[in-house]
Amino acid sequence: MFLGTHQPRLDDKGRLFLPAKYREELAEGLVITKGQERCLYVFPVEEFQRITEALSTAPVTAKAVRDYSRVFFASASDEKPDKQGRITIPQTLRQYAGLERDCVVIGANTRLEIWDAQAWDTYLSAQEQAFADLSEEVLPGIL
């Protein structure tokens, strides 16, 4: 499970230090792909394989499945952290997420998300009230 908020920076070569607490879990490899709201999703290999299997059972005759799968898999990049815990984010994914220097890496349960720091601040500010309003709808009887 991935939790928390971290604020690493991209270096000049497009590399990012993974949060130290997740390096061991991601040491054998990970997959980075486009996420919603112009962030990047980072999946451990096993979680990416689980999603791949789930999508392979979805009906290819459904246009939404085809569209989602095309973008999701075409933008995916398998990476392996170096000995210092850095991953290289491909240029096309950096452009998609608007990543230049200051980033935010958030834990999002079974994945990490990488955001441009300003985009994350804007998103979070816009979602604070919705978060408070939706707790009963999203988690009825739990919180």
Image: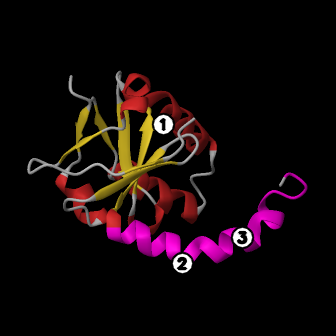
Q: Position of residue 58 (x, y in %)?
A: 63, 48
Can residue 68 be found in the magenta stretch? no
Instruction: Report which residue position mark 3 lands on.
Output: 132
Instruction: Report which residue position mark 1 lands on.
Output: 48
Q: Is residue 134 left or right of residue 42?
A: right
Whether 97 is drawn above or below 59: the answer is below
Q: Position of residue 88 (x, y in %)?
A: 20, 41
Q: Which stretch appears magenta? A: 118-142
Q: Is residue 86 left or right of residue 42?
A: left
Q: Position of residue 131 (x, y in %)?
A: 67, 68
- Disc with the residue nearer the chain's start (2 vs 1): 1
Q: Secondary structure at mark 3?
A: helix
Instruction: Report which residue position mark 2 lands on.
Output: 126
For the residues labelled 3 and 2, say whether their Cβ atoms are less than 8 Å apart: no
Q: Is residue 44 left or right of residue 9?
A: right
Considering the image in quadrants, where does the C terminus appear? bottom right
Q: Position of residue 38 (x, y in %)?
A: 39, 66
